[in-house]
Image: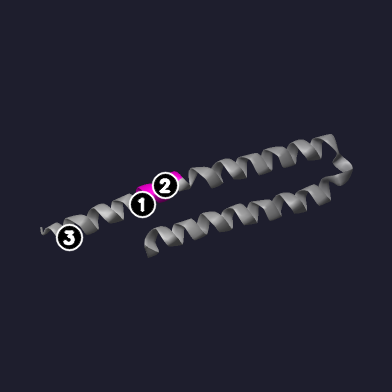
Amino acid sequence: MSALETLAAVEGSVNTIGFGLAAIGPGVGVGIVFGNGVQAMARQPEAAGLIRTNMLLGFAVIEALALMGFVLAFAI
């Protein structure tokens, strides 16, 4: 195994480890969004529709950022 092949193997591993660590942020973000959304719906049931819409939009933005990180981890 040449030095270049070893370097390529290490770089791939570092990208994978980096994405794994970066996935912690969106995981925490999704938990916060849904936790606070459910709490808000419990406090004001009459606004549940608006809260649910905003909660799902927040979830979509967080997941889009996580997917971009996933693509960039393998594109680099």
Residue 55 is situated, as x and y percent measured from the top left of the image, at 72, 49
* Quadrant showing the C terminus: bottom left
- The Cα–Cα distance between marks 3 and 1, rounded to whole angstroms, is 17 Å
* Quadrant showing the N terminus: bottom left
Where does label 1 land, which residue?
16
At x 78% / y 38%, what residue is drawn? 40
Where does label 2 land, which residue?
20
Where does label 3 land, which residue?
5
At x 75% / y 52%, what residue is drawn? 54
Highlighted range, magenta: 16-21
Q: Find the residue positioned furthest to the right.
A: 46
Q: Is residue 12 left or right of residue 40?
A: left
Q: Nearer the viewer, residue 25 or 41?
A: 25
Q: Find the residue positioned furthest to the bottom.
A: 75
Label 1–label 2 contact, CB within 8 A: yes
Q: Main secondary structure of the magenta part?
A: helix
Instruction: Tell me the amino acid under the disc marked 1.
Output: Thr
Whether 59 is drawn above or below 44: the answer is below
Badge 1 local density, few (<14 within 10 Å), some, or many (20+)?
A: some
Badge 2 local density, few (<14 within 10 Å), some, or many (20+)?
A: some
- The Cα–Cα distance between marks 3 and 2, rounded to whole angstroms, is 23 Å
